[in-house]
Image: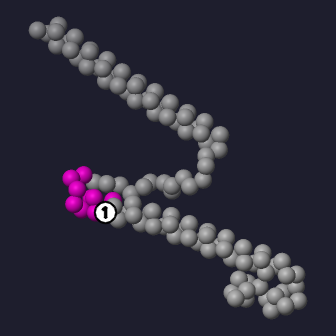
Amino acid sequence: MYILYGMTYEQFWFGDPWMAKAYREAHLLRRKMVNEELWIQGLYDYHGFGAVIATAFGKKREEYVNKPFDIFPKTEMEKREEKRNQKMKLINFLSSWRKRANAKQKQDKGADLNA
C-alpha cells in the first residue's frame, strides 16, 4: 500500500518508521486537493451549462463567468482595491447620470423658449 503512496521498498523496510505516516498523510492531502479541484471544476461546469441552457430557453442571453472564482481569502490590499473600484464605478455612474440630466434640462429649456 505504501508503494502507492510513493514510498520505495528501501524506505519502507529500512527507513525511519515515521516516514510511512508522513507518506500516508501526504497522500491524503493530495487526494483532498484533487477532490477540491474537481469540485471547482464542477462549479465551472454548472455555471457553463446553466448559461447555455438559460440562453437557449430563456428570454435573455446569459453570460458565462468572465473571471475565475475567488477561492482564497482576499488580502487587505485586494479589499482596499475592490472598495476603490466600487467607489469609482459609483462616481462614474453618478457623473454620467448628471450629464444626462443636465442635457435633458437644457433640451427642455430650449423647447420652452421656442414655444
In the displayed structure, does residue 44 sit left or right of residue 51? right
Asked whether residue 52 is drawn in magenta, I would say yes
Residue in the picture at 46% in, 33% down = 89
The quadrant where residue 14 appears: bottom right
In the displayed structure, does residue 113 sit left or right of residue 32? left
Colouring convention used in this rendered image of the protein: one colour
The quadrant where residue 54 appears: bottom left
What's under tag 1, amino acid-wise? Val
Residue 96 picture location, percent across and down: 37, 27
Residue in the picture at 84% in, 86% down = 11
Residue in the picture at 77% in, 77% down = 21
Kindly report the secondary structure that dominates the magenta region of the rendered protein. Answer: helix
Identify the magenta region.
Answer: 51-60
Say if 34 sits above or below 60 in the image.
below
Number of other residues with Cα within 10 Å of mark 1, as a class: few under 14, some 14 to 19, many 20 or more: some
Residue in the picture at 41% in, 66% down = 45
**Residue annotated with mark 1:** 52
Residue 58 picture location, percent across and down: 22, 56
Asked whether residue 15 is drawn in magenta, I would say no
The quadrant where residue 115 appears: top left
Judge by depth and name the residue closer to the eye, 21 or 84. Answer: 21
In the displayed structure, does residue 32 sit left or right of residue 38? right
Judge by depth and name the residue closer to the eye, 42 or 115. Answer: 42
Residue 43 picture location, percent across and down: 45, 62
Say if 26 sits above or below 86 in the image.
below
